[in-house]
Image (cartoon, rainbow, N blue to C red):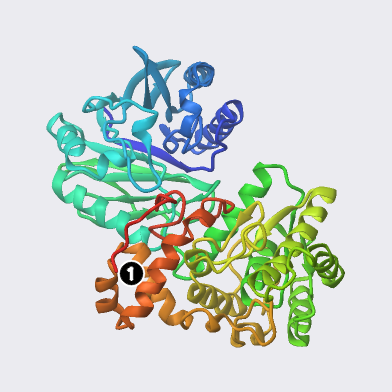
Amino acid sequence: MTDRLRIALCQLSQRVGDLAGNAEAILEWREKAAAEGADLVMVPELQLIGYPPEDLVLKPEFVRQTMEQAERLIDSTGDGGPALLFGTVHAEDGMNFNAVILTEDGQMIGRTLKHELPNYGTFDEKRIFANGPLPEPILFRGVKLGIPICEDIWREAVCAHLVQAGAELLLVPNGSPYENDKDDQRQRLVRSRVVETGLPIIYLNRVGGQDELVFDGSSFVTNDDGSIAVQMPDFEEAMELTDWVRTPNGWHCEPGVKASLSPYPEDMYRAMMVALRDYVAANGFPGVILGLSGGIDSALSAAVAVDALGADKVWCVMLPSKYTGGESLEDAAECARLLGVRHDVIPIVPGVQALDEMLDQAFANTPPGLAEENIQSRLRMVTLMALSNRFGHMLLTTGNKSEMSVGYATLYGDMAGGYSVLKDAYKTTCFALSRWRNANRPKGALGPAGAVMPQRVIDKPPTAELRPNQKDEDSLPPYHLLDRILEALVEREMSVTEAVALTGADPDIVADIERKLLRAEYKRRQAPPGVKLGSRNFGRDRRYPITNAFHTS
């Protein structure tokens, strides 16, 4: 029986479906940990296959190859180096399980199958996995290790069972996506489990972007007195060697690194950076292209892209119409100069004139209106997609959550593209992020220090510039009010009456916003993916029927 353990916590990114690549990365990190004298190397949930795997797990050949790679990892520990604790898929009796394997000396010495399968919000594990039984502790060098997997600690049963079965230490591998204020939520949860069980807990989370989700890491160790002994950084791969000592009162982690986690809005900005960086890299795009209008949304999107990818991989195009003001032209050019990106100006006026001629007979004897406005937006996207097709850059969509909520966006126009970093950011959040970025350079950013957009871009009234003297507030309430209403209706799922009571807004305005919100579902269903930032993003968290007769007003 040992009285000391050195456990290497490897906070890693993953590439979903890259079984050989993920296995190789695990072995590389294990080698680094071995050089530091680790007894045990721990990696996050489903590290071998990537999280979330979605319906890949339903493909028998995928599971077969996963189990082959798991055997490779088990065999690798026959070299006499540290033991390895890794997440994978285990197939048995026609069922697939979310599993963690503990291996040492070329042998599997224990396996835990995830008991609690999340099936809410972004999670649908019950679709692809079977529930494992309540897990038993795994004996490692005389120490009984309890290994609840992610959701297993969000319910009391698994941890209670492990402590009753004699577990001395809880090691929790996770695939927990970022959302605003998630750090505090996780730490409160872990502290409550420490109080209930009397055991210290290792909380190890993955990092990196995966489609709409981004994982922030932020792994930590909480001792049995509730204090945090180790805090790993957010949004970056890292390895931390934790030293454990058996005391008369149980196992105790010696103090280690205490990384500072990014506060709001820096955490949200970094989440957008990491999500875009990994999406572009994993899908093989040479860079991104976007329409730079001189407004705040495109300016912020361009700044995030440069910080994530570098200026050489970001191409901005101004697409003026006859309604585009001189200030917008100046502001777009200055944004591009501050960011150091390529900036082209391609007027859409000739295209608009061509469409006017094409539709002249069909539109005869009808007043001009929304159709003409949307033609401009769609011509911009036709132009940008032509450049994307010719040169390979992914089209970055620049619309925000406020617009997407109420349908203030053009289908097959400004909604078109391959990815959106602002999809889950309300307009007021975009203002906060822009002000913050103009005064700060985020950690890991490839963009410049200093301002990334003129102050006028932040200060001027938002406008789509699709008709003379147009302003967003001609069609919508002021954004500070609109966003409060939307937070009530979307994030909190309130009724109109409840939203009125919370916001103090006029009941007719709130009812109108609810109607717009429900009516725009068909647009959102066709929108590109975008990074999840809050608790109720469109698509993965909030799923409403397109055809829907229910209103609360």
The type of residue carrying mark 1 is: Ala
Query: On the rendered image, what quadrant is the N terminus found in?
Result: top left
x, y (%) of residue 93? Answer: 34, 12
Per the image, the residue denoted by label 1 is 488
Q: How many marks?
A: 1
Q: Residue at x 65, y 63 (%)?
A: 414
Q: Is residue 546 above or below residue 265?
A: above
x, y (%) of residue 102? Answer: 38, 25
Nearer the observer, 376 or 249: 376
Q: Quadrant of residue 39?
A: top left
Mark 1 residue crowding within 10 angstroms, few (<14) / some (14–19) / many (20+): many
x, y (%) of residue 177? Answer: 43, 50
Nearer the observer, 450 or 26: 450
Q: Residue furthest left?
A: 164
Q: Residue at x 50, y 54 (%)?
A: 522
Q: Residue at x 62, y 48 (%)?
A: 279
Q: Quadrant of residue 163?
A: top left
Nearer the observer, 492 or 112: 492
Query: On the rendered image, what quadrant is the C terminus found in?
Result: bottom left
x, y (%) of residue 491? Answer: 35, 63
